[in-house]
Amino acid sequence: MLAYRELDDTLRPTDTGAGTLADARTGKWPDVPADRALYDALDGRLRHVARLQDRPEEINMPTLNDLIAGDAQRLDTGFTFTEGPLYHPDGFYYFVDVRESKFYRIKPGEKAELLRENTGEGNGTTFDRQGRLIQCEGGNRRVTRWPADGTFASSEVLMDRFNGKRLSRPNDVVCKSDGSVYFTNPGLRIPLVERELDPSAVYRITPDGSNQHVADFEYPNGLAFSPDERVLYVANTRHAACIHRIELDSAGNMVRRSIFADMSSDEKIGVPDGMKVDVQGNVYCTGPGGTWVYAADGTHIGTIKTPEVPANLAFGGPDMKTLFFTAHTSVYSMRVKVAGLPGHPFQKG
């Protein structure tokens, strides 16, 4: 359920006589009309939660059985560390072997096909609105874009510096429907003497090519949008294992942030990493011991167990009801009952 922790630390529910949320320090609303509208929306959500709490029989929280339709099937194996899963509308998946700097394509029922080598430790991938591949190249410390024809004969650098300072290790990337590209830039694996941007952060590349800072993090990793794109979820990998919830305004700027989920665990394998969202707003995040699934209000529905703990995942298939896992040495698929969001605005045809 939505909790008061989702509100800004400086705000608390205050009885002002009107029964609304107000600034706890003054008891008054901020002067900015946009803030008032946002607080009204949050107030409405809290009131809705309170009504549900009064009528618990009306709450219908899904279980993993409501979401998962079968067991994981291994598609191929023999890799070092797979990542960057991405479904193409032509019916295949892209993925990378980060530590081998290799880029693959796999069709269901076939062995993976090597498409490109020397990727500069290519990692997270997505499509832009025109179907061009965007990739985070951690070793090359840049974000690149590749033509939509699938030849990978050339690329252009979308971003390798911010305010003249070199990026650290771009990790994961997602494209918003307006064409903006958001990516994570963790820096803890860069030697301190080579680290130019500190702390780590999420950045945005706008459609006109300009660059913006979105929010600072300890170690930002996977990221995904809510169905309405008003919320950007960001997984923090070190040391606070959690998912952040970033509320965005219409211009793509951060309005407020909160902790969406705590993924602390005694499991020895896995950290909060790759993330995707389904059409119902459920959040799937690879993490300790498997893939953790959350309802849109942050309730932990359950953890999907696969033969290997995955580092990332993507929805795919013609009906978007197949989960494709990149799980260290192998890649797997699993059928689900609720369609996923593609994670990018590219739709062929």
Image: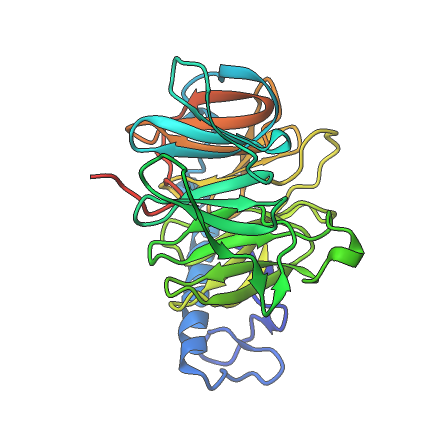
Q: Position of residue 164 (x, y in %)?
A: 60, 68
324 relative to 131, above or below: above
Q: Residue furthest left?
A: 349
157 relative to 270, above or below: below
Q: Is residue 67 visible?
A: no
Task: Report whether 194 appears left or right of 343.
Answer: right
User: Which one is nearer the viewer's eye here, 178 or 277?
Assistant: 178
User: Which one is nearer the viewer's eye here, 56 or 45?
Assistant: 45
Q: Position of residue 129 (x, y in %)?
A: 31, 50
Q: Position of residue 152 (x, y in %)?
A: 41, 37
| Quadrant into which the C terminus falls | top left
Q: Can residue 335 be seen in this view?
A: yes
Residue located at (69% from left, 53% from top): 187
43 relative to 338, above or below: below
Tell me which corner region of the image, top left, top right, bottom left or bottom right, holds residue 97: top right
Q: Position of residue 38 (x, y in %)?
A: 43, 70
